[in-house]
Amino acid sequence: MVDQVGKEILRVLQFAPRASFRLIGEVVGVSEQTAARRYHALRRDGVMRVVGLVDAAVYGEAQWVARIRCRPDRAGPLADALTRRPDIAYIGLASGESEIVCVIRSPVNAERDDLLLRRLPRSASVLDLTIDLLMHSFGEPGSADWAGYGDPLTEEQKAMLAGGRPSSTRAGNLLPPTEEDEPLLQALAEDGRTTHTRLAEITGWSQARVTRRLEALEASGTLVYDLDLLPERLGHHLNATLWLRTTPAALQQVGEELARHDEVAFAGATSGDYNVMAIVACRDAEDFYRYLTTRVAAVSGIDSYRVSIRVRRLKQAASLIAHGRLVHPPLV
């Protein structure tokens, strides 16, 4: 279980993923050495990973949400096979291991059958498949991130960190990476806090060139940083996806309100019959019931909902989940 200091470090990393250990220590109220030691312990234990990601829009790709219902005895092998695909950004087993929920990166004009169905193993015994476009993510960068309940950063702490945080406002169009960028981006995908000195060694560039290139990629929105977390290691053992239906007039308001909930790790608008999806992390079944009957119930504009209880998470963002730990995916 992560203690209070560990949780504060996680919140700092969400706001400023590449902040120095000195700055992290100042914000949290511990020494630079303690901040570094605690960070490395959290990463070594597989509780968290800071990762640098290239926005899929650079390659003309969108994100699609797929729900695959299949025979329970075939869901596990199929999910394991899909996990190895680089175009799958997230995957988990839900509903008694009879449903697979995954996010696919693919061009927005792709035929939905081409996204997944034609490439599923014939032995998968797929009973039903729905694929919907993820149209929009709700919440401001850094404000909708999840790290457990309570104790958000104060305005003073945010002000202290502002200088260590990549700009979330694009200075221009997305900047397509070049072949020369590949070593840089691969290193950041493995560890988003890789130092400029180490990046210079990996790329063979000068530190000044590394700095300039990072600033250009970050300012354009091409390179973004994320903090992958395991809610279970933070004491939140019930994870679910809410599928909500609302009218177009209420869509933005409902999504933004959900994104502000402490329990919500992600909220987005989809093209499906249930046009809002929210990934929720709660401590247990009673905590989830309380959330549904109080906070969700208070959101006006929701017509109906469904719930997929996640029983096993396999992949999220840039991390695989293996033996209860976040690990870097092997190169394919």
Image (cartoon, rainbow, N blue to C red):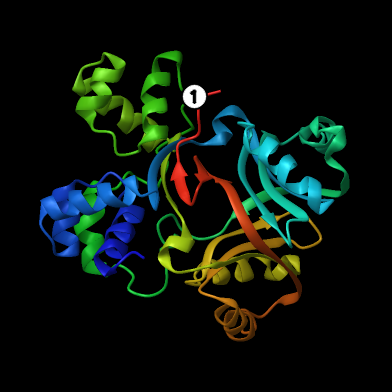
Position of 84 with respect to 35 (left or right) is right
281 or 298: nearer the eye?
281
13 or 208: nearer the eye?
13
Q: How many marks?
A: 1
Q: Which residue is mark 1?
A: 176
Q: Is residue 163 above or below residue 292?
A: above
Asked which secondary structure carries label 1, the reply is: loop
Q: Position of residue 287 (x, y in %)?
A: 55, 80
Residue occupying the point 64% across, 60% down:
311
Q: Is residue 199 above or below residue 4?
A: above
Q: Position of residue 81 (x, y in %)?
A: 69, 35
Residue occupying the point 49% across, 68% down:
236
Q: Position of residue 4 (x, y in %)?
A: 27, 69
| Amino acid type, residue under disc 1 in the picture | Pro
Position of 104 with respect to 117 (left or right) is left
35 or 135: nearer the eye?
35
Residue occupying the point 81% across, 61% down:
273
Position of 272 with respect to 212 (left or right) is right
Position of 137 with respect to 164 (left or right) is right
Q: Is residue 131 above or below residue 260?
A: above
Q: Quadrant of the C terminus?
A: top right
Residue 213 is drawn in which quadrant? top left
User: Is residue 285 at least partly visible in the picture?
Assistant: yes
